[in-house]
Structures are given as structure tokens and as C-alpha cells.
Image (cartoon, rainbow, N blue to C red):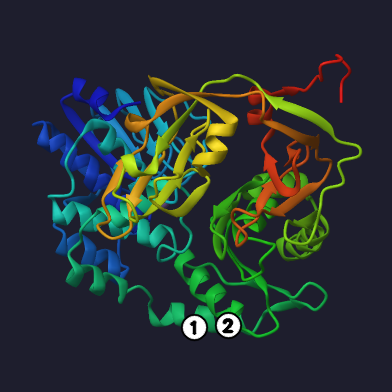
């Protein structure tokens, strides 16, 4: 769905989920501003048993002039837009409407709607709307009140920008200029005294696993922000290297995950422990997760969540092996040789983007990589939009450069950001095509176990390979080890046959 499709209607009601949070209110406000800019009639409403009382939300509504109304009944509108929730689900009161639109960032519940945009891999619904605004070319930066609302929506849903999930989350945070004074006040009226007590009670109920140095903490039902506050504190304990803090909310569970382990990112832990029963994600040190109550009881009938989490964490630490490219060499005796297919990929000369010596960040779905613009540094763009630096020598050796521009349809187009000015540029318009030469030969084999590789190129951060992904190294260097995702491998490599025709 694109926002401009909504402009076919005249009379809108925008609905937040019951017991609305900052993200829901911010997104509703954004949709409202957009529709108003096109002269449409629009209202923002919420319902349910509880009215907004949390001090930060009361302040947000008042200071940013957000016209949100509490309703118990609703006359059937021409179109109802539910934000930060999905029409028909249990967390949003159901009202009749002629047409339904859904904008959300939670797991897709499979609800039917006339218009639907659910991007589950975003940290906030405010980010989904921000990305949709960019797609429309709708200017939000000049609207400080709206910018502040969206920024605060993301801030609240990502535990203070700690649990960001998508490059667009980071883009929003860096791009929008907010009213600092209002933001500061919102930030500092986040918890009530009761919530402080909730945190205190949770902290004295920790469970500690001596063998794997993790902690599990159950909190009483509370705002997910409190979970982040508790987990940040728990991780600072000297013997604790990773932790999960969780609470039950309306029959489901919210989790906050922290890790300071080099070989176990918080995001990977969050994904692992919520597998099949919810979703998780975030960053190296901080992540969050959600477990659907009904799914959990279906699959783990007689277990309580605490015991499940302990067992699952123990399993996690046994589930993977680690390869360190500075110490380990791949044993290639049982590996086959592969060669890159002549699939067109893209490249950009770093100095075509910024002057020589400029520090810049390459931002892709896989994360940020910092490089310095140099005559001899190029940036490669793969078929799925993965972007990474390569030296000019290696480029010339492994690819045949073409003059044609490179184009690809991507989920997130890779960008480079000037580290000093903060200005970001889309890489695609600068990209030219190239084709791998026959010199790109690697050894590769399919993994049967989750493997984490600390590669030469980014030694701080491991590359995660799951079962069926490929582990590979250059034929000329058994320590140049890396992971190639199965989907990408299948599209870009084929078995290498030497001149004699014999497969190696
Ligand atoms: Mn949200």
C-alpha cells in the first residue's frame, strides 16, 4: 500500500490501539497531518477501558497539539485507518467502517483489509510511516511538532533507541530535527513511582545461570520501557554476560534482551528464543522480543515461560560454533570449488560519492560499515542490495567493469552517509554494472550447524551462518573466511569445473 492510495477517500478516522502508547499516537498524528495537507477530513480516536493517564503521553498530546479523542461509539466512517495495530485484533476496539486500512510494525496477523502495510522488521510504526512519507516525497522535516512526535514514538518503542531493527529506524533518528526542550521533558516523565517499584521487585527476583552466565528476570506486568531499564541494569552485574527481562501483557509476553558477549549478539538471542512463538530483533548489545501467549501454550503446553527461557538459553549456547579468521583456517579437503556466475552486480567508486579522505558510513540491511573515500576503494552492490568495500586491485582482478548503470529493485536501497556533514546519498544512482571474471573462485560448503565467523573484514562483528547457508573462503587464502546466505549463493555461484572437465 502507498499513502497516496488513501487520497481517493474524503472522510477518515484514524484509530490507535486501546491503551495507546507514544508510537501509536505519533503514527496517528502523522497520518492525520498527511491527510490534512491534502484537505481531507480526519479524526484521531482511541477506545477501550482505559483513558490516557501516563504523564509522558498526557504531555505529548498537549505539547504537540495532537487532536486525539477518546470514544466509546463511532459512526461508520468512510475509511478507518488503524495504526500500530491490526484491525480485528484483540488490542484494538472494533468499529464498523466502509473501508479498512492498516499501518503497523507488529507481526502480520493475516487480517484482511482494503489497504495494509505491515513491516514487522521495523522498531516502530512511526518508522513505517516515516519510510512511507519518504516514498511519497512528503516533507516532514519542516514540521517540528510532527518530527518530535515520530522521533519520540521510535524512542519509546526502541527502548531509547537501544533496540533499533531496520536501517530506516536509524535514518529516522538521524534525520528528524526535534524540539529538544519538549523531547527532554517527555523523556524525563517516563516512569511513575509505582513503576519504579515494579523495577525494584523484579530485580530481587532474578534467576542466574552459573554455567552460561545469563540471568532471567520476571517483572510484573508493566510498560515495556521498564523492561529495558531493568535489563540495562542487570547486564552491568559483573558475572552476568547476557540477560532476558520479561513480563506478561494481555496474555502475551514482552521481552528485553541484553548481551555483552562478543559471540552472542542480543539480536540473535532474541530471534532464537522467540522462534516459532513470536518475533525478536535488535542490535548487538540490546534487543527486544515478543511472544504470543496462545502460540506458546500450544507448543509448550505445561511449561512456564521462565523455565522455557532457561532451557532455551542453555540450548542457545550449545547451538553454534565460532570461527575466528585470525586464528582458524578452513579445512578445504572436503570442500568443492565454486565460481561466480556472470550475474550483473553494481559498483561505485568511493571518490565519485565524496572527496578523497572523507569518512563515510555505508548503510545496508545488514548494518553499517565505515570506510574512507579513496582512489583505490570501490563499493560493491550485490543482487540483494548488500554493499561492501573492495580494493581497486581486487575489483579489477575479479570483475569486468561496464559503463551501463546498475539498477535493482530493493527492500532498502543502500546509502552512504558523510560522517562529518551527516548528509546521506543513495548509492544506486551512482552505481555502474560489472560482471565477475572467471578468477572469482572459492571453496564452499553448506553448513549443518549455526556458525559465527569473525572475518578479516569486520573482526568486531561476526557474520551469522545458519544451517544450509554456505561457509566459504578464497581458493588463494584459507583464512579469508566468510558466510554466504543460501539464497544469494544459489543465485551467484556454480560448481567450478577445471579444463579437464573433472569437478573439483
Ligand atoms: Mn509500536
Q: Residue at x 27, y 52 (%)?
A: 26
Specify the label residue 201 is tagged with.
Answer: 2
Q: Can you tell me whether the CB of the residue at mark 1 lies under 8 Å from the nearest atom of ligand 1? A: no
**The N terminus, quarter of image:** top left
Which residue is nearer to you in this view: 106 or 236?
Answer: 236
Would residue 17 be visible to someone looking at this image? Answer: no
Above or below, 129 relative to 459: above
Specify the label residue 197 is tagged with.
Answer: 1
Above or below, 290 relative to 473: below
Q: Residue 160 at what x, y percent from top left?
A: 40, 66
Which residue is nearer to you in this view: 275 or 21?
Answer: 275
Q: Residue at x 56, y 73 (%)?
A: 231
Left or right of 187, for residue 326 = right
Q: Can you tell me whether the CB of the residue at mark 2 lies under 8 Å from the nearest atom of ligand 1? A: no
Element type at mark 1: helix
Above or below, 235 relative to 468: below
**The C terminus, quarter of image:** top right
Q: CA distance from mark 1 to mark 2?
A: 6 Å
Q: Are marks 1 and 2 in contact (CB under 8 Å)?
A: yes
Element type at mark 2: helix
| Occupied quadrant, residue 245 | bottom right
Q: Residue at x 73, y 56 (%)?
A: 325
Left or right of 257, for residue 86 = left
Q: Residue 435 at what x, y percent from top left?
A: 54, 22
Amino acid at each position: 500500500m502507498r499513502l497516496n492510495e488513501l487520497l481517493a477517500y474524503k472522510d477518515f478516522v484514524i484509530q490507535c490501539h486501546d491503551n495507546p502508547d507514544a508510537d501509536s499516537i505519533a503514527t496517528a498524528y502523522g497520518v492525520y497531518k498527511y491527510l490534512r495537507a491534502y484537505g481531507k477530513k480526519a479524526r484521531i480516536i482511541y477506545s477501550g477501558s482505559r483513558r490516557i493517564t501516563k504523564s509522558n503521553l498526557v504531555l505529548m498530546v498537549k505539547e504537540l497539539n495532537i487532536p486525539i479523542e477518546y470514544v466509546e461509539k463511532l459512526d461508520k466512517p468512510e475509511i478507518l485507518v488503524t495504526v500500530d495495530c491490526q484491525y480485528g485484533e484483540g488490542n484494538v476496539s472494533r468499529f464498523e467502517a466502509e473501508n479498512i486500512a492498516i499501518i503497523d510494525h507488529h507481526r502480520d496477523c493475516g487480517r484482511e483489509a482494503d489497504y495494509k502495510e505491515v513491516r514487522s522488521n521495523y522498531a516502530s510504526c512511526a518508522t513505517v510511516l516515516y519510510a512511507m512519507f519518504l516514498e511519497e516525497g512528503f516533507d516532514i522535516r519542516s514540521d517540528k511538532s510532527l518530527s518530535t512526535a515520530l522521533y519520540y514514538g521510535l524512542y519509546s518503542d526502541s527502548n531509547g533507541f537501544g533496540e533499533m531493527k531496520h536501517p530506516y529506524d536509524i535514518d529516522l533518528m538521524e534525520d528528524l530535527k526535534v524540539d529538544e526542550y519538549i523531547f527532554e521533558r517527555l523523556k524525563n516523565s517516563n516512569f511513575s513511582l509505582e513503576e519504579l517499584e515494579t523495577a525494584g521487585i523484579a530485580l530481587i527476583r532474578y534467576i542466574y545461570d552459573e554455567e552460561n552466565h545469563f540471568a532471567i528476570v520476571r517483572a510484573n506486568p508493566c510498560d515495556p520501557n521498564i523492561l529495558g531499564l531493568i535489563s540495562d541494569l542487570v547486564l552491568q552485574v559483573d558475572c552476568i554476560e547476557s540477560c532476558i527481562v520479561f513480563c506478561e501483557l494481555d496474555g502475551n509476553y514482552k521481552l528485553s534482551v541484553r548481551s555483552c558477549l562478543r559471540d552472542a549478539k542480543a539480536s540473535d538471542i532474541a530471534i532464537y528464543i522467540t522462534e516459532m512463538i513470536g518475533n525478536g530483533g535488535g542490535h548487538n548489545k540490546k534487543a527486544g522480543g515478543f511472544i504470543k501467549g496462545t502460540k506458546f501454550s500450544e507448543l509448550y503446553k505445561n511449561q512456564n515461560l521462565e523455565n522455557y527461557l532457561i532451557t532455551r538459553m542453555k540450548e542457545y549456547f550449545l547451538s553454534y560454533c565460532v570461527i575466528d579468521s585470525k586464528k582458524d583456517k578452513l579445512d578445504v579437503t572436503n570442500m568443492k570449488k565454486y565460481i561466480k556466475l556472470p550475474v550483473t552486480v553494481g559498483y561505485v567508486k568511493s571518490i565519485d560519492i565524496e572527496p578523497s579522505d572523507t569518512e563515510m558510513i555505508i548503510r545496508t540491511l545488514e548494518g553499517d560499515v565505515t570506510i574512507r573515500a579513496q582512489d583505490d576503494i570501490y563499493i560493491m552492490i550485490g543482487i540483494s542490495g548488500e554493499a561492501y568495500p573492495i580494493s581497486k586491485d581486487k575489483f579489477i582482478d575479479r570483475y569486468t567493469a561496464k559503463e551501463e548503470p546498475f539498477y535493482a529493485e530493493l527492500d532498502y536501497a543502500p546509502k552512504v552517509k558523510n560522517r562529518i556533514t551527516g548528509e546521506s546519498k543513495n548509492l544506486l544512482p551512482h552505481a555502474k554494472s560489472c560482471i565477475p571474471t572467471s578468477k572469482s573462485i572459492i571453496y564452499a560448503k553448506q553448513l549443518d550447524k549455526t556458525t559465527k565467523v569473525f572475518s578479516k573484514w569486520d573482526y568486531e562483528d561476526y557474520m551469522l551462518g545458519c544451517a544450509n547457508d554456505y561457509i566459504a573462503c578464497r581458493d588463494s587464502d584459507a583464512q579469508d573466511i566468510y558466510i554466504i546466505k543460501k539464497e544469494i549463493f544459489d543465485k551467484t555461484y556454480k560448481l567450478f569445473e577445471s579444463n579437464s572437465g573433472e569437478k573439483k
